[in-house]
């Protein structure tokens, strides 16, 4: 069964991601990230993180195949979803209407993962303003995924994780410094 990690973040998310990804081993399960950033900045973020972290990190492009040891960040200004093609899990990036007032949207990513078969996934919602990610994370959880939310005390803004927790999408809330180890315990 394919292991998969999906993370959504917004305000304060860059710093949170840096802390989490620092603890990821080079052979981490395929990891897909949506972080709300202005156009052009997700490419720079991916390059900066790639130079400092053990796994390979890049801005996602349509056609990228999910593989162990590779972390993909949704490009600013495009939604990202995962589809199954010829037995592989593949990224599709596309321009569409904003979801929860943002593009890319964690909801779009999480919902696409909830529809995949043969996937053992972990969904994570980090610091951020608004409600993006809550509905999609709930769909993931309802379809068997393990779900984690960042706790209030360690968030820059306890918006996205709060909404996800309140709607039942989050199984466990943990401080930022424990999220990587929790992910690894569920996705090895």
Image: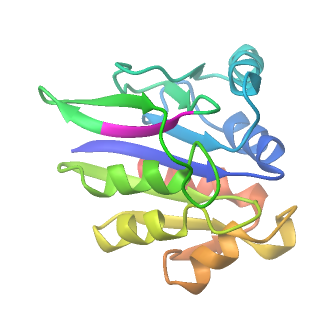
Give the percent coordinates (x, y) of residue 101. 64, 57
Residue at image location 42% in from the left, 65% down from the top:
146
Quadrant holding the N terminus: top left
> Is residue 129 visible from the viewing direction of this image?
yes
Residue at image location 49% in from the left, 33% down from the top:
95
Give the percent coordinates (x, y) of residue 136. 44, 63
Give the percent coordinates (x, y) of residue 91. 37, 29
In-image side of 49 versus 155 (left or right): left
* Above or below: residue 51 compared with residue 108: above
Q: Nearer the viewer, residue 142 or 11?
A: 11
Q: Is residue 81 magenta?
A: yes
Q: Say which quarter of the image contains residue 65.
A: top left
**Looking at the image, which residue sits at the far left?**
86
* Above or below: residue 73 compared with residue 188: above
What secondary structure is the magenta-colored segment mainly? Answer: strand
Which range of residues does the magenta coloring cover?
78-82
Residue at image location 86% in from the left, 73% down from the top:
153
Quadrant holding the C terminus: top left
In-image side of 111 versus 152 (left or right): left
Q: Say which quarter of the image contains residue 33.
A: top right
> Is residue 186 visible from the viewing direction of this image?
no
């Amino acid at each position: 069964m394919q292991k998969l990690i999906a993370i959504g973040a917004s305000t304060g998310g860059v710093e949170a991601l840096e802390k989490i990804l620092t603890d990821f081993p080079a052979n981490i399960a395929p990891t897909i990230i949506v972080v709300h950033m202005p156009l052009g900045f997700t490419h720079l973020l991916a390059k900066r993180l790639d130079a400092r972290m053990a796994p390979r990190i890049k801005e996602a492009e349509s056609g990228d195949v999910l593989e162990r040891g590779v972390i993909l960040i949704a490009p600013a200004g495009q939604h990202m979803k995962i589809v199954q093609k010829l037995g592989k899990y593949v990224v599709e990036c596309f321009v569409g209407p904003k979801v929860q007032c943002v593009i890319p949207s964690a909801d779009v990513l999480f919902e696409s993962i909830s529809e995949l078969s043969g996937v053992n996934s972990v969904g994570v919602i980090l610091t951020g303003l608004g409600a993006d990610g809550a509905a999609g994370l709930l769909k993931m959880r309802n379809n068997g995924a393990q779900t984690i939310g960042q706790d209030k005390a360690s968030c820059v803004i306890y918006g996205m994780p709060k909404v996800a927790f309140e709607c039942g999408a989050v199984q466990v809330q943990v401080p930022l410094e424990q999220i990587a180890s929790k992910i690894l315990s569920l996705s090895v």
